[in-house]
Amino acid sequence: MRFSWRGRGARPARADEFFFSAGETRQTPTPLMLLDPAFVYSNYAEAGLWTVMGAAALLKGHKDRSGIILGLTLIAFGASDLIESRTGAWYRPWWLFAWKAGCVLSILVSGIDLLRKRRRESP
């Protein structure tokens, strides 16, 4: 660790040298360190919204297979928003993108199936 003797006493010359000992390698800043709090809180709100919609779909469509799939998928999509609030992007890491894409596909398929069943049942 290199010290600067300016001012009152010894202090690290650079901030990153203060946080890492001589044996550690320096880390690049993670997206979590750089995230805007508004982004994080909006993802929390979005996760809550998807979860509430999923719970409503489960309660309303509990007798129908498509309704159950839709409800569980909406809850899973809400959980993926919690992960997104930590990673900073919906496409990073790759498995989060795959998770979200699978949820969107499942929401589309089960939603279309539910709409078709309602049209058949209505007079």
Image: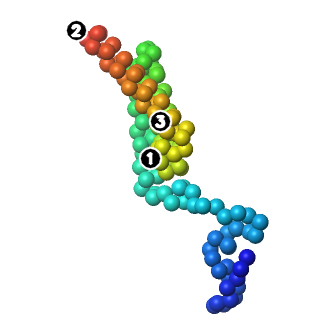
Q: In terms of depth relative to the viewer, which is nearer, 23 or 115?
A: 23
Q: In terms of depth relative to the viewer, which is nearer, 59 or 7?
A: 7
Image point (29%, 9%), residue name: 121
Q: Report helix, strand or loop for mark 1.
A: helix
Can I make out residue 55 in this image? no
Q: Which residue lies furthest to the left in this view?
A: 123
**CA–CA distance between discs 1 and 2?**
41 Å
Q: Nearer the viewer, mark 1 or mark 2?
A: 1
Which residue position holds label 3? Answer: 100
Residue count near mark 1 (Cα–Cα under 10 Å), binned few <14, some 14–19, many ≥20: many
Q: Residue furthest right?
A: 23
64 over 34 or under it: above or below = above
Examine the image and state in which quarter residue 49 appears: top left
Residue 43 is labelled as 1
Which residue position holds label 2? Answer: 123
Can I make out residue 29 in this image? yes
Image coordinates of residue 99 in percent, x first then y, are 51, 34
Examine the image and state in which quarter residue 66 appears: top left
Q: Report helix, strand or loop for mark 3.
A: helix
Q: In terms of depth relative to the viewer, which is nearer, 101 or 70?
A: 101
Q: Earlier in the sequence, mark 1 or mark 3?
A: 1
Going by the numbered disc 3, the residue's amino acid type is Lys
Going by the numbered disc 1, the residue's amino acid type is Asn
Residue count near mark 2 (Cα–Cα under 10 Å), binned few <14, some 14–19, many ≥20: few
Q: Which of marks 1 and 3 is in front?
A: 3
Image coordinates of residue 120 in percent, x first then y, are 29, 10
Going by the numbered disc 2, the residue's amino acid type is Pro
Q: Is residue 19 left or right of residue 49?
A: right
**CA–CA distance between discs 3 and 2?**
36 Å
Q: Earlier in the sequence, mark 3 or mark 2?
A: 3
Image point (60%, 61%), residue name: 28
Image coordinates of residue 27 in percent, x first then y, are 64, 61
